[in-house]
Amino acid sequence: MHLLVSFAGGMFGAAIGALPAFILCGFFIIIGVVLMVAGAGPDFLLNIGLGYTFGPHACFGAAVCAHAYAHKKQLAPGRDITVSLMGLKRPDVLLVGGLFGMLSAVLAWIFLTQLPFKWNGMHWTDGLAISITIMAIIARLMFSESGLFGKVAEGEKRYKPTEKSALWLPWQMNISENVVIGLTAGLLSSYLALLLGADRGGAFLGFGISGFSLVFLQFGAKMPVTHHISLVAAGAAIASGSLVWGALFGIGAAFAAQFWACTFTIHADTYIDPPAVSIFSMWSVMVALGALGVYTLIPLP
């Protein structure tokens, strides 16, 4: 059943485009948290907002791979995830989305159930984010000629890209910009997480709001991309019981996304999602520090 609904979710994501699919995911997550606060339980959040059809790994992650395939066929840019691929009038593009949707179900099953290493109830990494990353890497290797890490243009530096490069977010790339947006989104999401608590979906409310806010980016506004910041900060706040630890991890997630953008995305022709790589890598760091007792050794308000 999960394979079938993930197939449909992947085709749906490809049809409307990866970014619109993720925006819908953010909206569903907000609904799921509201229902939990109202006492309805986590079913909507887990099965719809984070589930096998409309979860970010299913519809967004699979759609990213469909964009890469469309690029291979010279139908659309591989990195423009705002494009609704239904307009290409190519059912094969949607079927590729469906197949990667099925792969998302397998990967999520592996990371969430077969590798269930935990600390204090938290998985060692974010299973959905790492699934998105693995699928995008597979699509890069299958459908791109730029190689896994892309090709740095002559005169450019990988980790100091200029406006000559196809930047990920030109308005969110230098040190001051990442500090400010990491601190802002990190504080807000950490506060919401501590206010609601883990049992009422507090870890996901900031993530949902950040994801849904990208509707403005879809229509051309220079919006900050903050869902990676929000999720990691909320997880750190809950793990440590500290607003400050959450904010620090929010800043770290902002810089991690820029690092991974330079590593995988800026110099390549298909899309490997920097926020997804930031989420699973920073989540692992956050859980590791908790397991080592760092939050107890360095208590912060």
Image (cartoon, helix red, strand yellow):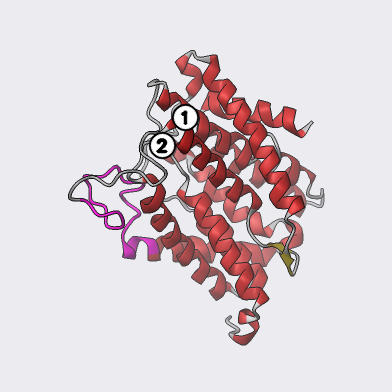
Residue under pointer 2: 270
Tag shown at residue 123: none
Disc 2 on helix, strand or loop?
loop
* Residue 200 vertical placement versus 103 (above, below): below
Q: Which residues are magenta?
A: 156-178
Label 1 neighbour load within 10 Å: few <14, some 14-19, many 20+? many
- Can residue 179 be seen by looking at this rendering? yes
Label 2 neighbour load within 10 Å: few <14, some 14-19, many 20+? many
Q: Main secondary structure of the magenta part?
A: loop
- Quarter of the image with the C terminus is bottom right
Percent position of residue 167, x then y: 31, 46
- Can residue 49 be seen by looking at this rendering? no
Disc 1 on helix, strand or loop?
helix
Between 210 and 113, which is closer to the camera in this rendering? Answer: 113
Is there a contact, CB below 8 Å, between mark 1 and mark 2? yes
Tag shown at residue 67: 1
Which residue is rendered at x = 56% and y = 21% of the image?
94
Between 93 and 210, which is closer to the camera in this rendering? Answer: 93
Q: Amino acid at mark 1?
A: His
- Quarter of the image with the N terminus is top right
* Residue 128 vertical placement versus 251 (above, below): above
**Is residue 185 covered in magenta?**
no
Which residue is rendered at x = 54% and y = 62% of the image?
282
* Residue 152 vertical placement versus 300 (above, below): above
Image mark count:
2
Which residue is rendered at x = 66% and y = 70% of the image?
239
Q: In this rendering, would 229 be left or right of 124?
A: left
**Is residue 172 covered in magenta?**
yes
